[in-house]
Image: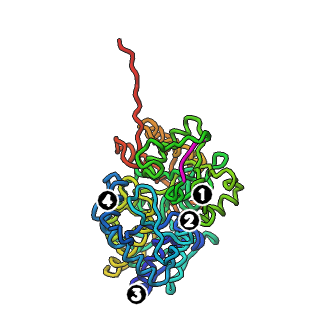
Amino acid sequence: MRKVIIIGAGLAGCYLATQLQNTCDVTIVTKKSIQDSNSMLAQGGIAASLDPGDSPSQHAADTLAAGQYHNKPAAVNQLVATGPKLIQHLIQDGMAFDRQSNGQLDFGLEGAHSHHRILHANGDRTGAALTSFVQGEIHQVHWKPYSTAIDLQVQDNVCVGVNIRNNQTQALETLTGDAVVLATGGLGNLFPLTTNNQTITGDGIAIAARAGVAISDMAFVQFHPTLLSLHGKCYGLITEAIRGSGAILVDENNHRIMANVPKKDLAPRDVVARHLKAWQQQGHQLFLDISAIPDFTSRFPGVTENLDNHHVPFRTTHRIPIQPGAHFVMGGITTDLSAQTSIPHLFAIGEVACNGVHGANRLASNSLLDCLVSAKKAAEAIQKIDAVTIIPQDTPAAPQPKPLLPSLTDLQQNAWQNLGVVRTKAGLTAFQNWLSQFNYQELQPSQLNATDLAITNLCLCASLIAKAALAEPKSLGAHYIQETTVKTQAG
């Protein structure tokens, strides 16, 4: 029986486990509890062309347009063709998506979609509902919660395992297997304002990069336009589905910020985020006006609970204070359409992977769909791989230099300023120079404490973003380079 090690307990990792558990010996490693993942936080829903008036080709066209045609068409076609079938299987197995009073599936609309095709569950708690349902389908898996993946075991350019650390006992352990799957999510906590779970610190990308695995498209980081913003800090996502239901973006003077932009408040996320950022820099406050949604609290119970927890008086003002924050990375570990990376027997699925499906800017609600599709394709490939022969090796620990790292706050502030919504070549170069004073590339992950390991991984991800952004001289999708004009005096 093949041994498979999955790093990450979000939707991608858990759905993969359901596909392999009857034929493989599966272990899932997760940094905290099985409830801690970005998948659990996903509000908007899952996109699929299941409505009779919709089609995979229309979904593909919207995905390509949002991605600025930087997508790989084969990956997009795989997503829109395979995704609806997997969702139908989940529905047959008992997954309950929201329905209209007549029993038909209730499809929502989100930015840059040409059709109502977003399925929701429990209103705006789709991610938690779907991930919990899939986790409930797991019955033959070894769990290793509260454990952090440290680095890969590679022999003769084949991945044969992973080193992990128990976060409670600090004990190190080597897990060996015929396939290792990275399903660790993105790198949102590189930035001070993010929708991401606190566990998301770029671990999978950093682990792969240190092992020489190919990485691609790191210039493309998506900033979600609407995070709940109070006193300069963000407290979770305000789902795009609210704008799809009629909410509009306004400032303190009730000026409609997106009025003169194509598709207005439902323009692609990169466009909306840049407009909001520019408006904010002019000294304006940013709000989401929800007065056009009479049944707001029943339609968006998760957002309502979050607003109430933070004492936002939205019932009387009909406004939610918002600002953009880091949401999703389109780049990551390079994979083919079967989730295979550049090192045999190492796979990557979900946000940590880059198979080209999202292009330069992910279309809203395609992320959960990609989790299902990439996991399904990985399962099919893993079923066909040969078993690996593992030769026990003792690798003596190299002397560890004293870590010289920035504080997480300094790293986040510098990343926000130079790698954020709007970038400049000068800022990217300055960021690289600032990062070069630290020795994050020389450190042995196994010898670092949890805090230093997270900062080390985020530094490595930040360097990959800066390098990739400088290599993209023109703006494209979520990578926006502001042209700076230097005036010279005529002699």
Relative side of 356 to 93, left or right = left
Q: Along the polypeptide, which appears first: circle 1 or circle 2?
A: 2
Q: Amino acid at mark 2?
A: Leu
Quarter that holds the C terminus: top left
Q: Along the polypeptide, which appears first: circle 3 or circle 1?
A: 3
Q: Residues within 10 Å of mark 2 (few under 14, many from 20)?
A: many
Q: Amino acid at mark 3?
A: Thr
Q: Residue furthest left?
A: 74
Percent from the top left, x then y, of residue 438?
A: 52, 46
Q: Along the polypeptide, which appears first: circle 3 or circle 4?
A: 3
Q: Residue at x 43, y 43 (%)?
A: 261
Look at mark 4 in the image and give the residue it sits on.
61
Residues at marks 3 and 1, CA–CA distance in whole angstroms: 39 Å
Instruction: State the predominant SS element of the stretch in magenta.
Output: strand
- Helix, strand or loop at label 1? It is strand
Residues at marks 2 and 3, CA–CA distance in whole angstroms: 30 Å
Q: Is residue 94 magenta?
A: no
> Residue 236, labelled with which disc?
1
When asked about the image quadrant of residue 471, the answer is: top left
Which residues fall within the magenta stretch? Answer: 247-251
Look at mark 2 in the image and give the residue it sits on.
41
Q: Residue furthest front?
A: 102
Q: Along the polypeptide, which appears first: circle 1 or circle 4?
A: 4
Select label 3 or label 4 by which is in front: 4
Look at mark 3 in the image and give the residue it sits on.
23
Residues at marks 4 and 2, CA–CA distance in whole angstroms: 27 Å
Residues at marks 3 and 4, CA–CA distance in whole angstroms: 37 Å
